[in-house]
Amino acid sequence: MVAPAVDVGELAFGGSEIRQLWSFLDGSIMALDTRQRLWRSWGLCPRHAWGYALAEIEVHGGKPLSTAILYEDLTRRAARVANARLKPWTLIRRQLGSRATCFTCDYIEMGGPTAAVDERDRAMARRVNQRARVAVMLDELLELALHRSCPACLGGAGIICRLHLLDRDRRPPGLPGDLEALATRLRALINSMTTRRTPVGPPERVSWIEALGWFGGWDGLHKLAEGPATPELNPERAHHR
Ligand SMILES: [Zn+2]
Ligand SMILES: [Zn+2]
């Protein structure tokens, strides 16, 4: 059966989710203790990993720079975990599982933040949920992204995602090399977005989507491909339904 490994819910984010993700975008994701926990949890949960990337693209600079930096780091670490030839697959699989909870989920669960949400958070959430910039990116990248998706999630020809690997009894061939290649594409994407500005093509530009899909399953892309769920954000779609 082909189905995304987890359901990330409707990709419409609330003010408190955006408020927490924004604090990461403001730089706290670079803090060492934060990064150490993100190593253990393999990034944010699938919903908030997509939320982070969308917030970054829509309201924080227009490109997935911090997303690519975080996921290059995580992808290289995962490649190293997967590359230990003498280690039994059961142990590798366990190490590829999450051992910490998601920051954003914890923040929301604590309950307090709803009171702190202000008009700025709500305005940012509206822009993130409209996804105007991501829609432009997907015009170019959607077909390639679907092709590179997890075969078990969306029937693509890409790397089996981490979440589906956790159910596999056998070591998939080529996994460390596939992850290294993904990390290399992410590095090229990062270089293209920083002062080096080296030119890259669609295989690099799509790499942040591939990384989010590998770590958290491909439901995020599946939902993005459907367009904004709220009819007033997408009147044309509502009209044709
Ligand atoms: Zn979360
Ligand atoms: Zn999958």
Image: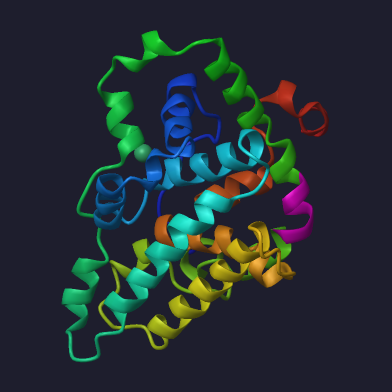
Q: Position of residue 22 (x, y in %)?
A: 48, 31
Observer-nearest residue: 125 or 143? 125
Majority SS type along the magenta span: helix
Left or right of 32: which side holds 140? Answer: right
Observer-nearest residue: 71 or 150? 71
Instruction: Please tell me which residue is depicted at 22% across the width and 48% down the height of the picture.
Output: 100
| Above-or-below relation of 166 to 216 | below
Left or right of 193: which side holds 201? Answer: right
Left or right of 165: which side holds 223? Answer: right
Q: Which image quadrant for residue 133?
A: top right
Which residues are drawn in magenta? 136-141
User: Which quarter shows the C terminus?
Assistant: top right
Q: Is residue 18 magenta?
A: no
The reply to whether residue 201 is in sight is: yes
Q: Is residue 138 magenta?
A: yes
Q: Position of residue 178 (x, y in %)?
A: 47, 80
Instruction: Please tell me which residue is depicted at 41% across the width and 60% down the height of the picture.
Output: 215
Q: Position of residue 110 (x, y in %)?
A: 25, 22
